[in-house]
Image (cartoon, grey):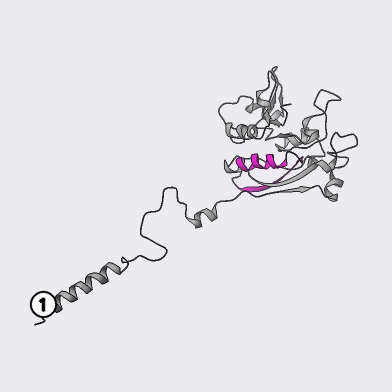
Amino acid sequence: MRPPWVVLAFGLLVAVLALGSPASGSGRHDSGAPSPAGHVDRHEAARQPRFDAEVFKLGRPQKRRMRGVSYHHGCPVPLRDLRLLRLDHWGFDGDVHRGRLVIHRTKARAILDVMREAFRARFAIRRMELIDHYGGDDRRSMDADNTSAFNCREVAGRPGVWSQHAYGRAIDVNPIENPFVTSSGYVSPPAGQPYADRSPTRKGMVTRRIIRSFGDAGWEWGGRWSPTKDYQHFSSNGR
């Protein structure tokens, strides 16, 4: 039989060791506490597409492609004041695509912010190609449901009046889903007829979030014009 003081000392030692030992299953990287609210696993976050975009000065090859097509003698803005944007956008197929826009240099960063917000909202854009791909023809671009910006042209039906597109300060978004509609019922492009009625909201139709994002950048929406509505059109001066 051990003396009582030996038993007491042994018991104290066990207690001290128990207090100093980590709990079973714990480690340096896991405290065993629940994850904070809103925590996203880093592996899950890595799988979520991130918006990627770049801004470039127009290079010589790009200028050659534009001259005589979307740009010609007498345009109200020099080529040196334009910028090429290459950016990610969601397509109608649910995948991420790479699009291109030409914008005035003073508006490029603001439009990237708008497109970043559109990407976060998973707003679908059918295609985003330079107007040069359609020979500088606005009707061909609209018929293809192409989202575009710079095009050195006059306002339709107003000879001698430059469109804001001629300054790189306007964008047309999904023209079929957001057509030009007059009070007499004329719709352009023709394929946009089903979208002249703005309810319910369907894929590709501009949403309040998109309109608000353009507004935050100082751009106005043609869908607020009266009586004619240009639902596809956003510009820096509202024209």
Q: Inspect this view and state whether residue 62 appears.
A: yes
Q: Does the magenta-highlighted stretch encompass residue 99?
A: yes
Residue 37 x %, y %: 41, 48
Q: Quadrant of the N terminus?
A: bottom left
Residue at position x 22%, y 74% from top?
13
Total numbered badges shown on the rendered structure: 1
Q: Quadrant of the C terminus?
A: top right
Horizontally, residue 2 falls left or right of residue 62, namely left
Residue at the spot 71% in from the left edge and 21% down from the top edge: 186
Which residue occupies the extreme front position in the image? 5
Which stretch appears magenta?
95-117
Query: Badge 1 is on which residue?
Result: 4
Judged left or right of residue 32, residue 93 is: right
Residue type at numbered disc 1: Pro
Quarter location, residue 25: bottom left
Q: Is residue 149 magenta?
A: no
Q: Nearer the viewer, residue 5 or 177?
A: 5
